[in-house]
Image (spheres, rainbow, N blue to C red):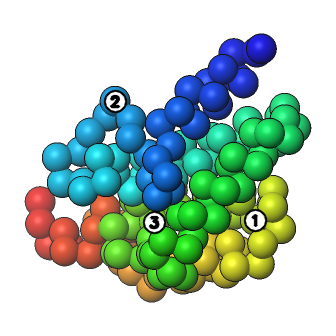
Amino acid sequence: MSIVENTAKTLLTWSQPDGTYNSPYKESTSTAGIGSWNFAVATNALTRVYNMTKDESLKALIKENVAKEFQKFGVDQEVRDYYDDEGWWCLTWIEAYNTFGVADYIQRAQLILHNMADAWSTTCGGGLIWNDTSWGSS
């Protein structure tokens, strides 16, 4: 087994039945034990591993986890005005759409992208800050 496949299998061992991940990294404010952006990055990594290996058993596990995540919170789950997390989720849903072809996944990515685009500001020369309550802070 390659190092890439071993990494994917390790990430999958952290997958919980409800579609969340339980990893060694814990955020103090996260009720799921892992921050939203961590779950997005892990899911994206697993999807990319499948795309490199074409391991059908891995694909089935990833597809199940992605579907659980989608069903758990509804279409607007990642739209929380934490733009850094949203960016990771947008990339993840694009990757999931490209892999599994589920139209809902690209629609979710578009929703997130539009939310981020609406938050663009010219403050400090333009861009996004990490969340909507931070504008005007140092």
State the mark number for residue 106.
Answer: none
The x, y position of residue 8, in whole percent, is 64, 31
| Marks 1, 3: nearer the viewer | 1
- Residue under the image location 35 percent in, 75 percent down: 80
Q: Give neighbour class at mark 2: few <14, some 14-19, many 20+ (Cα, 10 Å).
A: few
Callout 2 secondary element: loop
The x, y position of residue 55, in whole percent, is 84, 35
- Contact (Cβ within 8 Å) of mark 3 with mark 2: no
> Mark 1 — residue?
97
**Quarter-wise, where is residue 122 in the image?**
bottom left
**Residue type beneath disc 3:** Glu
Q: Earlier in the sequence, mark 1 or mark 2?
A: 2
Callout 3 secondary element: helix
> Mark 2 — residue?
24
- Residue under the image location 66 percent in, 56 percent down: 64
**Residue type beneath disc 1:** Tyr
Decide if residue 60 is on the left or right side of residue 105. right
**Quarter-wise, where is residue 107 in the image?**
bottom right
| Marks 3, 2: nearer the viewer | 2
The x, y position of residue 81, in whole percent, is 34, 75
Rounded to the nearest angstrom, the CA distance separating label 1 from label 2 is 28 Å
Would residue 117 be visible to someone looking at this image?
A: no
Q: Earlier in the sequence, mark 1 or mark 3?
A: 3
Decide if residue 138 is on the left or right side of residue 35. left
Q: Earlier in the sequence, mark 3 or mark 2?
A: 2
> Mark 3 — residue?
86
Does 47 sit above or below residue 2? Answer: below
**Residue type beneath disc 2:** Pro
- Residue under the image location 68 percent in, 49 percent down: 62
Would residue 45 be visible to someone looking at this image?
A: yes
The x, y position of residue 7, in whole percent, is 61, 24
